[in-house]
Image: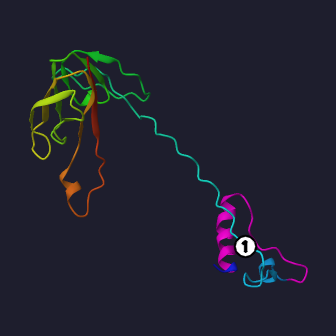
Amino acid sequence: MSFRRIWIAMAIALPSAGCSAAPSASPAGTSALEQAPSPAASTTPTTAPAPAPAPVASAPEPLATTSAAPSAPGSPSPQASAQPSARPIRSGPGPFAEADSGATVQLNVGESFTVSLGSDSHQPQAQADAVKRTAAAGGYPTKDAAKATFKAVHAGQTDVVSNTDAGCLHTTPRCGIAQQVWTLHVIVR
């Protein structure tokens, strides 16, 4: 790399680090760049300064949470709150819906539960064998709600997950919509 390229790299990197890299004028009226010997004539290697370290990004905070209780059919769905809140652990079987994403449920071996999500969601799946999916229907790409029934088969923990999908995500060019992940944490005792 030539001295000129190193100087250009310094001129780009140093202002972002709060330093000035402008060549200073010498008494003879030439810049420091013009006075510097070429790298071939120098006996000491020249190196570019290390770039300033990038800021460390922390994990994003959840933007909103919803009530852990499922909505009754025909009632308005719970509104999202601006502040994250701790979700209580729900005990026993029952229906779970989109508003229950992120919830935790404790079940006894042999108990069953159902999950019902929108038609834009894939059928929910268990990530481990503590629960077994016993029935499933609908979901993307059908126009029917994604429904699944699970049974607790042995002690352990797993997540039941699903994600949304859309036809435009499978075309060229792809659309820019965000996919949502739905998760239910399951503890079997």
Q: Residue 101 at x, y = what percent?
A: 29, 30
Q: Going 68% across and 79% down the picture, which residue do you hit?
A: 4
Few, some or many C-alpha atoms within 10 Å of disc 1 (few <14, some 14-19, many ≥20)? Answer: few
| Picture quadrant where residue 158 is located | top left
Q: Residue 14 at x, y = what percent?
A: 69, 63
Q: Residue 176 at x, y = what percent?
A: 30, 54
Q: Going 36% across and 21% down the picture, which residue do you hit?
A: 87
| Picture quadrant where residue 135 is located | top left
In the displayed structure image, the side of residue 38 where residue 26 appears, left or right: right
Looking at this view, is 50 or 71 the one in front? 50
Q: Is residue 19 magenta?
A: yes
Residue type of the residue flagged with mark 1:
Thr
Where's the N terminus, which quadrant? bottom right
In the displayed structure image, the side of residue 67 where residue 20 appears, left or right: right
Looking at this view, is 76 or 98 the one in front? 98
Residue 111 drawn above or below residue 13: above
In this picture the colour scheme is rainbow
| Picture quadrant where residue 180 is located | top left
Disc 1 target residue: 46
Where's the C terminus, which quadrant? top left
For the image, the number of numbered tags is 1
In the displayed structure image, the side of residue 21 where residue 148 appears, left or right: left
Q: Magenta residues? A: 4-29
Q: Residue 66 at x, y = what percent?
A: 33, 26
Q: Going 23% across and 22% down the picture, which residue do you hit?
A: 70
Which element is circle 1 on? loop
Residue at the limit of the structure toward the right, as seen here = 27
Q: Is residue 102 magenta?
A: no
Residue 118 drawn above or below residue 171: above
